[in-house]
Image: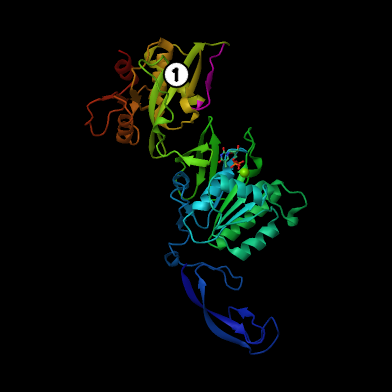
Amino acid sequence: MKKRNTSIFRCASCGHEESKWLGRCPECGEWNTLTESTVQVPAGTRRGGVPQSVPLSAVDPQEGTRILSGIGELDRVLGGGIMKRSAILVGGEPGIGKSTLLLQAAATADTKGRILYVSGEESAGQVRMRADRIGVTGDRIEICCTGRLPDINTVIEAIKPVIMVIDSVQTLHSDEVGLVPGTVNQMKFCSWELISWAKEHDAALFLVAHITKEGVIAGPKTLEHMVDTVLYFEQNDADSRFLRAAKNRFGSVDEIGIFTMGEKGLSTVEDPSLLFLVSREGELPPGVATAAVLEGTRPLLVEIQALTVPAKGSMSRVFSDKIDQARVSRIAATLEKHLGIRFSDQDLYINVAGGIRIREVGVELAVAAALYSARTGIPVPARTAITGELSLAGEVRSVRRLAGRIKTAKGIGFETFLGPIPDSGENAEFMSATDLRQAVKLLFS
Ligand code: TYD
Ligand code: MG
């Protein structure tokens, strides 16, 4: 950290320090005992309780550098490692693997500093058992089992950790805020104290928060604005778990980390391009299309499944929890308007294989193809990957990283690719469409 020289005036009699020379020491009352000396203080710190600013150019850019966690997927979601002086909230349902993830990260983090794991939920023995199970040695991890803030404060002052994990914020309490642990006020007060400590001591803080199935996150939600980064750990099918950033001051919120939980803890899925496909021989069933989408910066091939059945009520409904319902309705309306296929008397069901949620616009043309195929009974040709955004006017709009999507699709055996017109038209097997009508013609005739 950058240091600057500054003068202080220390009392020779009692040691009291002042920022200005005074004739009489305000502490012990002695006269003419203050003498000037020069000390180094970190840039931007307070002196004598007087808030000070520093020139931006004098701030050390190394302040708040990153520590690699040793878990590639976690580092990527964080924006390239754990930022020092940052607070990271890790939310998720009980049993999803938050404790496991952070214990693994604690064991592999690339730092020589101390790592403190505060568990208010489990005993030291239980944490040790988990560490043994996932095969990490706890040599550099200090464990402390309490949720009492004064106790935690004593421990952190003593060991000055570089990384701290608080598992979980729901167990934090301090007598200063009342006697009942688990209230929102307790959680906010204690978290704030710990966040401040981390920021002042160049440490990184992970705050684990449980979130119930119904998504009731009233408690942890109030912490979101206090922290720098909010990660949510989600589980969408039997063994894939997704780590997403909902907020990130130091990186993008597009990246997603994919893990599987095994017998020995979490493992990362570095090449997820096959994870969301269903292996099929021969022709595809109607209603199925493969989308080449981006998750953050990574292209991903996902199978989109559509089903249309005559509406049960007088209104047509959309059932789609992995792709936004409003988006599905809009795509169906665009198909109806530009190709004259009726969807407004149908109930529409959309699913994504592997249970991943897709937000990227590049999925739209594939959703249109799946819906068209479901409604007409004509299958999408096998081994065809589709990408493109759809406008209300029925145009196929360009997408980011088109070349990367094509490359990934080719790499895992897709032979045909349908998408918007590329900027540099060099691809032979590539079919490009400017509008929906043309896209449907290319696919289905
Ligand atoms: P845990 O990290 O305790 O979840 P959280 O802290 O989010 O509540 O993970 C608990 C689940 O993971 C539990 O059901 C057991 C399972 N698990 C494994 O399958 N393999 C393992 O190696 C470990 C450590 C846990
Ligand atoms: Mg836990």
Up-down relation of residue 305 to residue 228 (above or below): above
Query: Considering the image in quadrants, where does the C terminus appear?
Result: top left
User: Measuring 43% from the left and 14% from the top, which residue is drawn there?
Assistant: 374
Q: Nearer the viewer, residue 181 or 226?
A: 181
| Range covered by the magenta-colored residues | 314-324
The residue beneath circle 1 is: 332
SS class of the residue under badge 1?
helix
For residue 142, which quarter of the picture? bottom right
Q: Quadrant of ligand 2?
A: top right
Up-down relation of residue 345 to residue 418 (above or below): above
* Outermost right residue: 179
Q: Residue 126 at x, y = what percent?
A: 64, 47
Q: Residue 363 at x, y = what percent?
A: 41, 28
User: Measuring 58% from the left and 78% from the top, which residue is drawn there?
Assistant: 19
Q: Nearer the viewer, residue 269 or 243?
A: 269
Q: Residue 122 at x, y = what percent?
A: 67, 47
Query: Left of 68 or right of it: where is 206?
Result: right
